[in-house]
Image: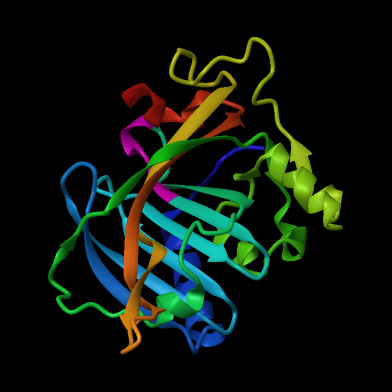
């Protein structure tokens, strides 16, 4: 399995079709655009979309280097999806975009419910947001490749989000075991050679056509992670809790996976 290089025309078409799919199938979705400060100090517009009917949340923003990051939480299936459309290095023989998709299990209390997200509003749309809590980076060994033709069993959203990545869709063994216990078909998963003895990190490999272990890092700089509760006091002094806001978090992810040659992981040279 390897990351797929794609033409800019195909990327634009696929992204446009995906957006059209969202607008058609998620007609009840609500959107919120916030201005967020990235780790490098740059400001980006982040789009948050919530669909309470399909019980899902999408977060999308562009990094300072031009990479488009899309995150989706599917609460019905307890699945989260990360997609990165990475600008290529034309002077080194790459196409304009490289697509990656990572699928993992969604844990409880990682992000606020879709119904709460759908009701979010901001008083000052021009305000620049920074997260209240910076959570530790999660390191994930994505040692299983995923066959897109059967991913409907995991989540109906995976094919729409990850079809542009095709052969660069990964998950991890611990999540696969959980999904198999739930009755998901095992033929959609293919083990990868991430932890094979002797397999070097792409950052240490000199030959561009040598297989290696690639790491890709991303950070969700701002997202609503928890609901805040306040208390009303009545004349008797008793209090009743009510939702009075959200807590924002920032969280990093490091995905490690196998690539058949270093040419598909040139960003490791920059770290």
Residue drawn where x is 50% and y is 66% of the image = 14
Tell me the residue at 17%/49% (across/down).
Answer: 42
Is residue 76 or residue 21 the one in the foreground?
Answer: 76
State whether residue 39 is above or below residue 271: below
Q: Quadrant of residue 39 in the image? A: top left
Query: Is residue 56 covered in magenta?
Result: no
Question: Can the viewer see residue 259 in this picture?
Answer: yes
Residue 177 % position (x, y): 79, 44
Give x and y (percent) for residue 134.
32, 45
What is the basis of the colouring in this image?
Answer: rainbow
Pick the residue in front: 252 or 64: 252
Residue 250 position within the rendered picture, expressed as x and y whole percent measured from the top left: 34, 50
Image quarter hosting the C terminus:
top left
Start-end of magenta stretch: 85-92
Say how many tags the image has: 0
Relative to 261, 137 lies left or right: left
- Looking at this view, is 226 or 24 the one in front? 226
91 in magenta: yes
In the picture, measured across the screen, residue 105 lies left or right of residue 88, that is right
Measured as percent of width and height from the top left, residue 257 is found at: 59, 32
Using the image as rendered, state which of residue 201 and residue 32 is in the foreground.
Answer: 32
Please tell me which residue is depicted at 46% across the width and 30% down the height of the picture: 265
Q: Would you place residue 214 above or below residue 148 in this image?
A: above
Q: Residue furthest front?
A: 236
The answer, for residue 220, to whether it is visible in the render is no
């Amino acid at each position: 399995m390897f990351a797929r290089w794609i033409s800019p025309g195909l990327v634009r078409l696929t992204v446009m079709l995906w957006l059209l799919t969202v607008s058609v199938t998620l007609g009840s979705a609500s959107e919120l655009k916030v201005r967020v400060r990235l780790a490098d100090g740059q400001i980006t517009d982040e789009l948050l979309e919530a669909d309470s009917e399909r019980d899902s949340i999408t977060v999308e923003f562009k990094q300072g280097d031009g990479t488009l990051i899309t995150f989706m939480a599917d609460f019905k299936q307890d699945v989260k999806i990360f997609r990165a459309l990475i600008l290529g290095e034309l002077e080194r023989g790459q196409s304009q975009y490289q697509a990656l998709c990572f699928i993992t299990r969604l844990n409880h209390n990682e992000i606020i419910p879709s119904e709460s997200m759908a009701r979010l509003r901001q008083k000052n749309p021009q305000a620049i947001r920074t997260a209240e809590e910076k959570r530790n980076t999660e390191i994930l060994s994505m040692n299983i490749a995923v066959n897109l033709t059967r991913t409907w069993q995991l989540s109906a959203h995976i094919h729409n989000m990850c079809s542009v990545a095709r052969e660069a869709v990964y998950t991890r063994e611990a999540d696969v075991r959980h999904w198999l216990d739930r009755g998901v078909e095992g033929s959609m998963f293919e083990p990868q050679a991430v932890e094979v003895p002797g397999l070097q990190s792409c950052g240490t490999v000199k030959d561009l056509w040598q297989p290696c272990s690639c790491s890709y890092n991303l950070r969700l700089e701002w997202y609503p992670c928890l609901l805040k509760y306040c208390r009303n006091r009545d004349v008797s002094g008793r209090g009743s809790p009510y939702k009075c806001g959200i807590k924002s978090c920032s969280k990093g992810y490091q995905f490690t996976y196998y690539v058949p040659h270093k040419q598909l992981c040139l960003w490791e040279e920059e770290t």
